Amino acid sequence: MDIDVFANAHSAQWHRLSLLSAQRHLSGREADELVALYRQGATHLSLLRSNAPDPALVSELSVILVKARARIASPHDLTWSTALAFVTRTMPAALYRVRWWSVVVSVACLLVMVVCGVWTAGHPDLLNSLMSPAEQRNVAEQAFASYYSEYPSASFAAAVWTNNAFIAALCIATGITGLWPAQVLFYNSLSVGVMGAVMHVHGADWVFWSLILPHGLLELSCVFVAGAAGMRLFWAWLVPGHRTRGQSLAEEGRTTIVVVVALTVALLVSGLIEGFVTGSALNPWLKIGIGVVMCAAFWVVTFVAGRRAVLAGVDPGLSEEEARSRVAVAG
């Protein structure tokens, strides 16, 4: 096979295939042409690989075919209405699916925080074994407050957001183990409890609450939901119900992926609050009020908007095809 002659003979077809693959809207005739050119291109690629494996030409044609295949296989174009439906219906439905796990995990973690804080504050020897008195004074008098104003707001908000989003995603990704999310939540709760004890012992309660509540209410809510979603994934594998373990993990896995996206958005809001509000010169009560409103909005989306979406038939654990073909079963 003469590679130059072959390329010249079919380059117009490949160029046309590339143009159709990049075209946003296709008529019926153009769609048929795209499929036909894709089949021809696949044949050409096979011939090139077997008879004249020119690396540059094979690579070029492969890229064109990948784009064409993606265009053919795509079930629909992404539209603003699709994106809006995902944000307003699918994401709330996913959060609603894990709502009671989230509540139980939140209550358990808050209980650990309170018990740890009260116990540590009431036992000075224990507190001193965790942090020296000099370190405690430094934290209470300077370090805790300066943490929120030490860096530029934008970079601080970005760093906080990416770190918290990574932790939330990791909690969910490792949820199948059933242990790692619980461990992360437990040690995070202990850390908050100990810090609260340090601030209380040194008379800096108001500094602690005025700086932790503006962003912490929403941030901790997201961490609790992430841990709950991860542990729910483990439970779906352990107790699949009427589904097979594979089906159970597939459905709950899709739900948890949507939860990750929802929490990433919520943690972005939390990061912005922490970066631009927590350490600002605004009235402390106003800052706390912002935190309360954002946290309340998160739980309203979870319980109210999520319930409406689920009642409307939205199931983030099923693909559109599976949802259409699903058969109800007893129990």
Image (cartoon, rainbow, N blue to C red):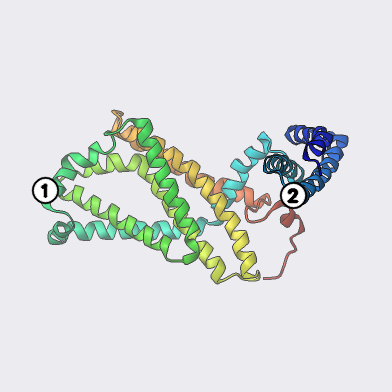
Report the residue at 70% width, 70% height from top. 330
Asked if 6 appears above or below 181 in the picture, the reply is above
Mark 2 falls on what kind of element?
helix
Lateral position of residue 192 relative to residue 266, left or right:
left
Asked if 244 appears above or below 310 in the picture, the reply is below
Judging depth in this view, the residue of 188 and 313 nearest the camera is 188
Kindly identify the amino acid type of the residue bearing the numbered disc 2: Arg
Mark 1 falls on what kind of element?
helix
Q: Position of residue 147 (x, y in %)?
A: 26, 39
The quadrant in which the N terminus is found is: top right
Q: Which residue is mark 2?
A: 49
Q: Which residue is mark 1?
A: 134
Mark 1: few, some, or many residues within 10 Å (few <14, many ≥20)? Answer: few
Q: Position of residue 121 (x, y in %)?
A: 18, 56
Q: Position of residue 280 (x, y in %)?
A: 30, 30
Q: Position of residue 116 (x, y in %)?
A: 26, 59
Mark 2: few, some, or many residues within 10 Å (few <14, many ≥20)? Answer: few
Report the residue at 27% width, 54% height from top. 193
The answer to whether residue 102 is seen in the rendering is no
Kindly identify the amino acid type of the residue bearing the numbered disc 1: Ala
Of marks 1 and 2, the one in the foreground: 2
The quadrant in which the C terminus is found is: bottom right
Report the residue at 42% width, 51% height from top. 167
